[in-house]
Image (spheres, rainbow, N blue to C red):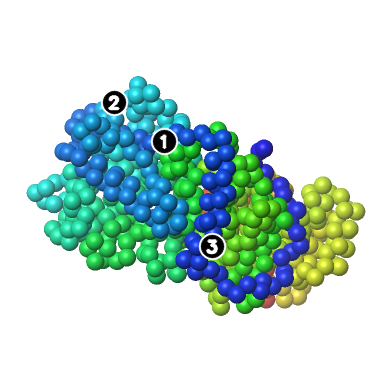
Amino acid sequence: MSLSLRPFLALCGLGLCLSLDAGAATPQEEIATQVPAARKILDTWQADQPQKEERYLHLVYWTPKDREPAPRYRERLTKILEHIQAFYAREMERNGLGPRTIKLQHEQDGLVKIHLVKGDAPYSDYAVQSGGKIRKECLPVLEKAGLDAEKETIVIFCNMSNWDPIKQTMSQNSPYYAGGTNRNGTAWQVDSPLLDLDLLDDKEPFLQDGQYGKISYGRYNTIFIGGVAHEVGHALGLPHNKARPDQAALWGTALMGSGNHTYSEELRGEGKGTFLSLGEALRLASHPVFCGSVKGFDVKPNAVISEAKLTPSAEGKSFTFSGRVTADPPVYAVIGYMDPAGGSNYDATTRTAVPDKEGRFTLECDALKSGRAGMLGIVAAQANGAMSSFASPGAERTFPYYVEADGRVDLSATHATEALAPLMKAVNARQEVGVRLALDELANQNVEPRILETAQVLADTLQGKAGPHPSQVDGNVCHLSDAATLEVEVGYGRPLVNRLPAPDNLLIAGSRLYPRGLYAHAPARHVWDLGGKWTRVKGVAGLATGHDGSVNCLIIGDGRALWRSPKLQDGSAVEFDVEVKGVQKLEFKVTDGGNGNGSDWGVWLDPVVGR
């Protein structure tokens, strides 16, 4: 069975009914009610014709050609990794999943097994971006030891720090990142003579770190031992996520948020420390390294979600996501990521749910950021460790929402996607009869006025006729998307007004729906003749929701820059209101955000000029 998002396109209703729930569960209630049900699904499947195998975290110590390993690296790293092993075990136990944790191999002397690799070049030839090069140099040593890095989880400690014990200064120029799945993963770390568990509770002395400034030896080790724990999480397939306020009040900072900066800080009385959220723990529970099961090891993610519905709560300040999930191996947990725009995914809060016997589930989506756009991401955790992900940037189906300043949730962008699916299909096929039928059907439904307006504007795009130039328009307002242009260029595809290229026609940015606008994939230019007859231009500039590029937007009047946007990314949008009194020629320009124009779907939304 292959991964499919198609069922999302046939969602039940528009999710406009009100939720009557009495409030989301507390962190303790989540664990008490969900984990036994999740374990029953997971353990039952793994116990049927079990395939047990000890899977280990394999360790590599890599050092440049002109450097020897840092002193006592085996002793130091053994203590650190065993401490991290105990942290994961304790947190999995607290989450009700038993003391599952990473497994480490030890040599006869009791120290962890570490494969030593000498680099092909001197220190000066490597940098933060050298992770791929360093990993490639490690492969022959791993292969000689009988390890296939494509089927193992590897941690590479890079001897790329610079410690001056006289000046008490530290800098590092090492790869420091990770990624992985249930089948394989790689984490790059940095080692130094100061990376030492015995120093973790030291409030002094202090050092001057090139990245973090003046910090105690203990704080240094919190950051970099915590960094090992954090990056190991990525190598095991965990994404970033932030603790919800109710979780943080109890336990501190989520490991996959900024928990690498708070790891064991409670030893120094500096905070609550770091914890594993339930979403993190549930994902790890089926990982072969944690559970020792390789049943279904080669089966790829294949979950399908149908009957999906987004429903606002009674008070309107949260919402639920419900549906039915089917998969083989079965899904034992569904994790929802409420990710506000900006901040990468570090500030995504999570909620979890366990499917019932029919695969039905409901996620309570709360802990939302007021005044911010957001995107709901869904992960279905399968019993073999595979993670089926939905609604990520660039995916076929996304779930945007917007939280007003007063906390009320606006789901109109997602509801419009469902309500207008038949109309969009007919528009893309240029079937006028189908368009009329879809419009008639919408008129008989209780949909929001903005959705009806969008439907009519979208239907009108089949005519493809621009209005007069703004200089020829009477009245107090002129919609620029409906007006004739002097010049138009877009960086991908052909120029379009009041729609985006198929299949995602709707103009959505900042998780809000706009009936009118201009497709302006970078690099793009739209130029109009104003004839000096207009006073102001207003609207919204943004990056289309569901696209992960970055753009800069510029408004130019008679060759002079009148307004510049900040860099727009993560589906963000910004309003503009600019004086154009006396301007003859108005230009909207979109450029890439400095990293090429891939996925740079810029949009100008509801742009109007007024008297």
Q: From where the camera sits, is residue 376 visible?
A: yes
x then y, percent, for residue 51: 51, 34
Residue sitting at x 20%, y 33%: 109
User: Which one is in front in this view, the residue at disc 3 or the one at disc 2?
Assistant: 3
Left or right, residue 126 beside residue 21: left
Residue sitting at x 49%, y 69%: 26
Task: Give amino acid for label 3.
Answer: Thr
Q: Which mark is residue 33?
A: 3
Residue sitting at x 11%, y 51%: 167
Q: Which of marks 1 and 2 is nearer the N terminus?
A: 1
Q: How far apart are marks 1 and 2 (CA)?
A: 29 Å
Q: Quadrant of the N terminus?
A: top right
Task: Give amino acid for label 1.
Answer: Arg
Q: Do the residues labelled 1 and 2 touch (CB within 8 Å)?
A: no
Q: Is mark 3 on a helix, strand or loop?
A: helix
Q: Place residue 585 in its image quadrant.
A: bottom right
105 or 432: nearer the eye? 105
Q: On screen, 499 above or below 72?
A: below
Q: How far apart are marks 3 and 2 (CA)?
A: 53 Å
356 or 244: nearer the eye? 356
Q: Name the residue under label 1.
A: 55
Q: Place residue 154 in its image quadrant.
A: top left
Q: Residues within 10 Å of mark 2 (few under 14, many from 20)?
A: some
Q: Which mark is residue 120?
A: 2
